[in-house]
Image: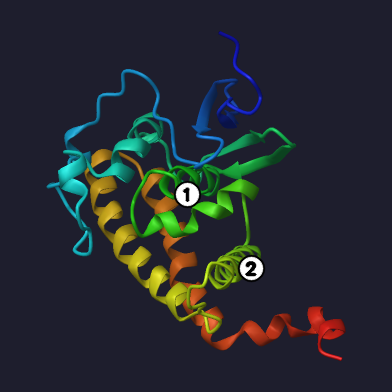
Amino acid sequence: MSTTPESAPLNFRYTFAFDDDHQVVIDVNLDPVTLAYIPPAGQSPPDWARFDTLPCEQCTGVQEKSDYCLVAKNIAPVVDLFKDLSSYQTADVTVETRERTISRKQVSTQEALSSLMGLIMVTSGCEDLDRLRPMVSLHLPFASIAETTYRAVSTYLLAQYFRYKHGLEPDWDLKSLVETYRKIKVINASLCQRLRMASNQDANLNAVIILDTFAQMLPDSIEDDMEQYAYLFTQYLD
C-alpha cells in the first residue's frame, strides 16, 4: 500500500559532515497530525534511560506507561552516536525538512545537537515538554534566544486564542508559560545527570545545557523584557 503525503511522517534529517569526511545522518520522524515522535524500529533503550534511574520530581504517571523515561529513551540513540565527541568539535550541519534546507558551516557539535535533541524531547510525550510541541510544526534549527522567545510567546498566545474559542479561560498574562519553563528546568537538570552517566565527552551534556539556558532566560524575558518587542506592533496600537 502506497503512503500518501497526508499520512507520511513529518521528517527532519540532520546531517553532520566532519572534517575527516565522516558523516552522521539522523532522521527524526513525527506523526504528521499529532507531531509525536516515531521511534526507530528495534530500539533497545539503555539502563540510564530507565524511569527509576533519575526521575524528575514532578513526573506523574509515566512509570505506568513505560519502564523508561520517554525523553531519555528517545534521545538515547543520538547520545550513543555522540558520546565520544567534544562539544567544541565542529561540523558542517545540514537540516532538511519538507519545506526547506538549512545549512551551517563549522557549527559546534553542541549547538547542532541542542537543536536536534530539543526537537526529539518536545515530541516524546513528556507531559510538561508537550506544551512546546506546537512549535515543532515550524521547527527553526539553530534558533537564538530572541527567536526562541518570540516563537514561544507567539505559540502560547495562539493557544490561548484557541482556549478562548473553545470556551476555556485564556491566560493572556503568560503565567502558565512561565511555570512551564520552570518545570522544564527541572527536566533538564535530571536529564543532564543521565547524560553524565552515558557520555565520555561533553557534547551531549552541553547540548542540553544550551537548552537549559533558554529555559532559564525565557521566564525572565517574559516577565521583564517583552516590551522590547512593542515597537514591532505600533500599527496595532494606534
- Residue drawn at (56%, 48%) of the image: 136
Q: Quadrant for residue 75, please give it.
A: top left
Closest to the observer, 133 or 96: 133
- Residue drawn at (15%, 44%) of the image: 64
Residue 93 horizontal side relative to residue 129, left or right: right
Disc 1 on helix, strand or loop?
helix
Q: What's the CA distance linking mark 1 and mark 2?
A: 18 Å
Report which residue position mark 1 lands on.
Answer: 118
Query: Is the residue 235 above or below the residue 155 in the image?
Result: below
Say which of marks 1 and 2 sits in front.
2
Residue 144 horizontal side relative to residue 126, left or right: right
Where does residue 43 sit, x and y in percent of width and height? 31, 23
Q: Amino acid at mark 1?
A: Gly
Q: Residues within 10 Å of mark 1 (few under 14, many from 20)?
A: many
Which residue ends up furthest to the bottom in the rendered image?
238
Report which residue position mark 2 lands on.
Answer: 154
Where does residue 173 sit, x and y in percent of width and height? 53, 84
Which residue ends up furthest to the left in the rendered image?
52
Give the quadrant of the N terminus. Answer: top right
